[in-house]
Image (tube, rainbow, N blue to C red):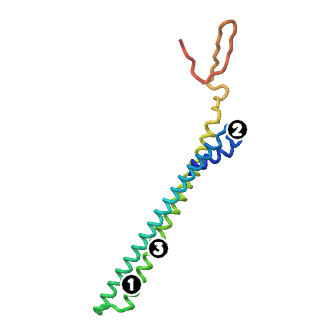
Amino acid sequence: MSARAQQILESHRGYATVLGSGLAEQRHRVVMTDSWRVAGQSLRARTVLSMLNARLNLGECLSLAAVLVVGFVLIDHNAPTVGGATTAMLLVLRLLGPVNQLLLVIDTLQSALASLSRMIGSSRLRSARRMSQRRPRAPPYGSTRSRSVTARGHGCSTTSPSTSPPVSA
């Protein structure tokens, strides 16, 4: 998804350059390819989510059928009452509801986690960029580390402060 966004932004920002260089068709193909890739990934993600929902519903159906069969057999043998079997069925329904909801919310939680990590990653990139643009600080005036370097040759000389220790030859 980020590759598609990058291609679109680059093509939009450099629209005049893309047109002037005759790269419009190539950029269009790249954006279309990335868009189809994103659509395929989204479709795959929805398929996985639908399969998860189907399996959750199947599990719920099987557990309710098992409670129904056990309740029917027990009522047939005069062990519990009909109200007890109904209560057991409702209890299973109440237990499975929050579990199913939690499993369905995991998708949203993962999406939020991915967005958060992208935001943190981009903020780290910005701070690293700012750190690389800063100039190194010179030592304070009168520091024991500041020395001057003199270079002479071919009739000219220059002197400049240096923060590195002197080199002895």
**Structural crowding at the residue carrying mark 2, measured as other residues with C-alpha within 10 Å and reported as few (<14), some (14–19) or many (≥20):** few
Q: In the rendered structure, which disc, 3 or 2, sits on the residue that comes first in sequence?
A: 2
Residue 123 visible (yes or no)? no
The residue shown at (67%, 27%) is: 141
Q: Position of residue 30 (x, y in %)?
A: 58, 46
Q: Are marks 1 and 2 in contact (CB under 8 Å)?
A: no
Residue, disc 2: 20
Q: For the residues carrying marks 3 and 2, which lies nearer the camera in this image?
A: 2
x and y percentages locating residue 69 in the rendered image: 33, 84
Q: Residue at x 68, y 11 (%)?
A: 157
Which residue is disc 3 drawn over?
98
Q: Secondary structure at mark 1?
A: helix
From the viewer's perspective, tell me whether residue 155 is left or right of residue 163.
Answer: right
Residue 88 has which mark?
Answer: 1
Is residue 10 rendered to the left or right of residue 37?
right
Q: Which amino acid type corresponds to the residue marked 2 in the rendered image?
A: Gly
Amino acid on which the number 1 mark rests in the picture = Ala
Given residues 64 and 85, the one toward you in this image is 64
- Mark 3 Cα within 10 Å, few/some/many (few <14, many 20+)? few
Category of crowding for the residue at label 1, using alpha-carbon neighbours closer than 10 angstroms: few (below 14), some (14–19), many (at least 20)? some
